[in-house]
Image (cartoon, rainbow, N blue to C red):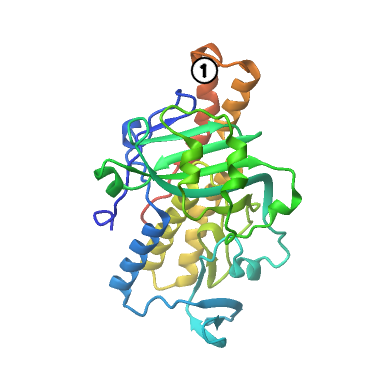
């Protein structure tokens, strides 16, 4: 799949021109990949149909209820196209149905809703001239007020001498109605631009980038508290259904992929699906839950808060504001938490 994909590999992360290298450039065993989410979905869909058959994915089905006994799981789904209800029996049910997971609600019916941190997000993509070296991710500002993230996501655009930029605007707001986690809300350019009036980032015109975007999505930054278990018996969770986290540190999709890998390995290694689901949960839950909590206080935000307090009028050298020891202490803990990877092979 990777050979067919048009991934980019960002090599640098910059915040105020003082960021580290990332991925292979930082000595890691794996690169940092950036790709348009829609293209990644298409790649995965194509791979599933090639490996499991053209009818392996049925669209327009909405899960409404779950029933389980010792021998099977029964899923009640609604075909939204024809407004028909049908039941589907299976050996196991893997809830990969995201933040508002029906499967999670079945397992934890008294759990409270998503946890909002007061930040409103807008996200879009636009093609532009490359900024800096064409493979740099920019993080500017602070989540105490407003922050802006931008990075290229298309190798195809790069080969044409252009950049397809994914950008995220994060603004702390005081409107309680902004916490409604509606993922289909279309944002408005005029709501985003005022928060970045006067911002100047070398090589990147924020106002021009936002204005050149097509559809802009708008939603709150939310997560959920870690669960004591992801499933019982023949049911489990994966991805955002299991561990929804703030979209910081590129860990949302990454942890879902690692979870899917561990789950597939366990299921392939045994004829006992209940035991496989239990081993998967043991391998992944504690680690993923730790990242959920770590994402609530990212090192980058702590660094920016300290810099803002100590050098409100700017600075020339980061070393004049934070010592190397302080920087290391702040970043090492999160790096250790997020880089721990569960074994690729199942336990015996």
Residue, x 62% and y 22% (percent of image)? 308
Q: Which residue is disc 1 drawn over?
A: 325
Up-down: is 176 above or below 298? below
Q: In the rendered view of the protein, which quadrant contains the C terminus? A: bottom left
Q: Nearer the viewer, residue 55 or 71?
A: 55
Up-down: is 202 above or below 279? above
Residue 1, horizontal then vertical, whole percent = 28, 58
Q: In screen coordinates, is 104 left or right of 39?
A: right
Residue, x 62% and y 38% (percent of image)? 194
Residue 300, horizontal then vertical, whole percent = 54, 31
Q: In screen coordinates, is 206 left or right of 171?
A: left
Residue 277, horizontal then vertical, whole percent = 49, 65
Up-down: is 303 above or below 127? above
Q: Nearer the viewer, residue 8 or 344?
A: 8
Residue 3, horizontal then vertical, whole percent = 24, 54
Residue 347 visible from this viewpoint: no
Examine the image and state in which quarter residue 294 appears: top right
Q: Disc 1 on helix, strand or loop?
A: helix
Up-down: is 206 above or below 341? above
Q: Nearer the viewer, residue 76 or 117?
A: 117
Q: Nearer the viewer, residue 343 or 169?
A: 169
Residue 45 visible from this viewpoint: yes
């Amino acid at each position: 799949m990777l050979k067919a994909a048009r991934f980019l590999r960002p090599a640098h992360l910059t915040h105020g021109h003082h960021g580290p290298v990332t991925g292979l450039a930082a000595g890691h065993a794996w690169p940092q990949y950036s790709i348009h989410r829609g293209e990644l979905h298409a790649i995965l869909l194509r791979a599933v149909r090639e490996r499991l058959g053209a009818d392996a994915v049925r669209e327009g089905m909405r899960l409404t209820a779950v029933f389980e006994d010792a021998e099977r799981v029964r899923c009640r789904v609604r075909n939204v196209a024809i407004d028909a209800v049908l039941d589907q029996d299976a050996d196991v049910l893997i809830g990969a149905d995201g933040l508002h997971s029906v499967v999670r609600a079945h397992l934890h019916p008294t759990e409270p809703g998503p946890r909002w941190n007061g930040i409103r997000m807008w996200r879009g993509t636009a093609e532009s001239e490359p900024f800096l070296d064409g493979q740099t991710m920019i993080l500017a500002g602070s989540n105490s007020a407003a922050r802006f993230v931008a990075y290229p996501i298309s190798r195809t655009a790069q080969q044409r001498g252009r950049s397809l930029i994914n950008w995220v605007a994060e603004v702390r707001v005081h409107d309680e109605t902004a916490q409604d986690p509606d993922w289909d809300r279309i944002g408005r350019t005029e709501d985003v631009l005022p928060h970045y009036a006067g911002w100047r980032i070398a090589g990147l015109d924020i106002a021009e980038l936002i204005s050149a975007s097509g559809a802009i999505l708008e939603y709150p930054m939310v997560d959920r508290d870690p669960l004591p278990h992801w499933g019982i018996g023949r049911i489990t969770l994966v991805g955002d259904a299991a561990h929804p986290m703030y979209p910081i540190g590129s860990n949302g999709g990454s942890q879902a992929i690692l979870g899917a890998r561990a789950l597939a390995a366990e299921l392939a290694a045994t004829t006992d699906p209940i035991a496989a689901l239990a081993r998967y949960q043991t391998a992944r839950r504690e680690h993923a839950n730790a990242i959920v909590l770590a994402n609530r206080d990212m090192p980058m935000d702590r660094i920016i808060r300290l810099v803002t307090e100590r050098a409100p009028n700017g600075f020339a050298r980061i070393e004049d504001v934070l010592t190397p020891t302080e920087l290391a202490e702040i970043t090492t803990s999160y790096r250790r938490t997020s880089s721990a990877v569960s074994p690729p092979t199942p336990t015996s």
